[in-house]
Amino acid sequence: MTQQPGPGRPTGRSRRSIGVQGQTRAVQSTPVTTRLADIAAQAGVSEATVSRVLNGKPGVASTTRQSVLAALDVLGYERPVRLRQRSEGLVGLITPELENPIFPALAQVIGQALTRQGYTPVLATQTPGGSTEDELTEMLVDRGVAGIIFVSGLHADTSADMQRYEQLRGQGVPFVLVDGFSPKVQAPFISPDDRAAMTLAVTHLISLGHTRIGLALGPKRFVPVQRKIDGFVRAMQDQLGLTAETVETELVQHSLYTLEGGQAAASALISRNCTAVVCASDMMALGAIRAARQLGLDVPKDVSVVGFDDSPLIAFTDPPLTTVRKPVPAMGQAAVRTLLEEIGGTPAPHSEFVFMPELVVRGSTASAPGDRNRP
């Protein structure tokens, strides 16, 4: 039996527009409140909930949001532009840069995993003086992506406003956050175990006789940096008996995640008599090797250097770099799998999936200088 349209409801194929903030249009003489009441009754929710969905406000469960959108379709109303069905073929990937080879490596894993599932990745990269993360996000949303994966984004910066992610969720866009964690964002996170990474590096260097070990890493406001410091301090306390204050004031040097940043940080640490330097990225580690050589020191004879990431081609540097391998394939595949579950209507819990790194020993580490003559 064909259901007859009720009073004020559109008939046939004609669709009417719903007034939302910034898009309100008159629809004959039917009051907005009547239309909200119709939609609320059809969806089985309150008018206030319908209003929140239509205006892209956060705080509405995914299933409830879908019920409201379905009610719009059943009653013949046009969905507001921002709520129309998104293309299932596009997934955005936002990275902070591509100069550090670990980001292209992660992008390749994510892109391949998306392609195997029938999606097309759209890579959006921030550049100095160019587009910001918020601008890239807006661009991707405007193009109707089915979801977004953020890599080392503002979610990793403890000084950033996390409300931007709640606004994105309010627009009904699924997303996953890689590298970094915030308790203020209701989303799934994918991270390496930064604390365990430092334990692996410190344990390796202590086994070679090093007792004066420095840590070179980025600005302290970033979550991965804070976790690396925590892991480094604990390892130095547990294995060498040093105090946390001594480690943090004498053996930790902040800089930039670049070759030049690693060089500056390592120079400072070597001047404090460090015979080994653990770096928070492979790029910084290459800078540390340059710093040692400019000081007339040999790596690893005089100074041992450990990197982090195991970026492509890093095994072929001079010397080949000892590093802590970030589990990029596992992390990338988990990010895609989690996002597709979100897109499919099965939201992942607000939790962090942590992946264990692996120590890769090569030629940039050796016995401590004063330890070589021991039997």
Image (cartoon, helix red, strand yellow):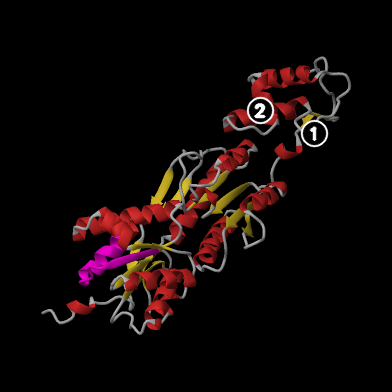
Q: Is residue 244 visible?
A: yes
Q: Is residue 277 left or right of residue 191?
A: left
Question: Which residue is identified by label 2?
Answer: 52
Q: Residue at x 68, y 48 (%)?
A: 138
In the displayed structure, 67 sits above or below 196; it is above
On the rendered image, what quadrant is the C terminus found in? bottom left
> In which quadrant of the rendered image does the N terminus lie?
top right
Graded by Cα atoms within 10 Å as few (under 14), some (14 to 19) or many (20 or more), the crowding at tag 2 reads: some
Query: Which residues fall within the magenta stretch?
Result: 199-216
61 on left or right of 306: right
Rendering coords of residue 238 (x, y %): 21, 55
Amino acid type, label 1:
Gln
When asked about the image quadrant of residue 122, the answer is: bottom right
- Residue lying farthest top? 7
Residue furthest right in the image = 28
Q: Secondary structure at mark 1?
A: loop
Q: CA distance from mark 2 to mark 1?
A: 14 Å
What amino acid is labelled 2 in the image? Answer: Arg
Q: Which residue is mark 1?
A: 23
> Is 10 above or below relative to 258?
above
Question: Does the magenta run of residues contain 209?
Answer: yes
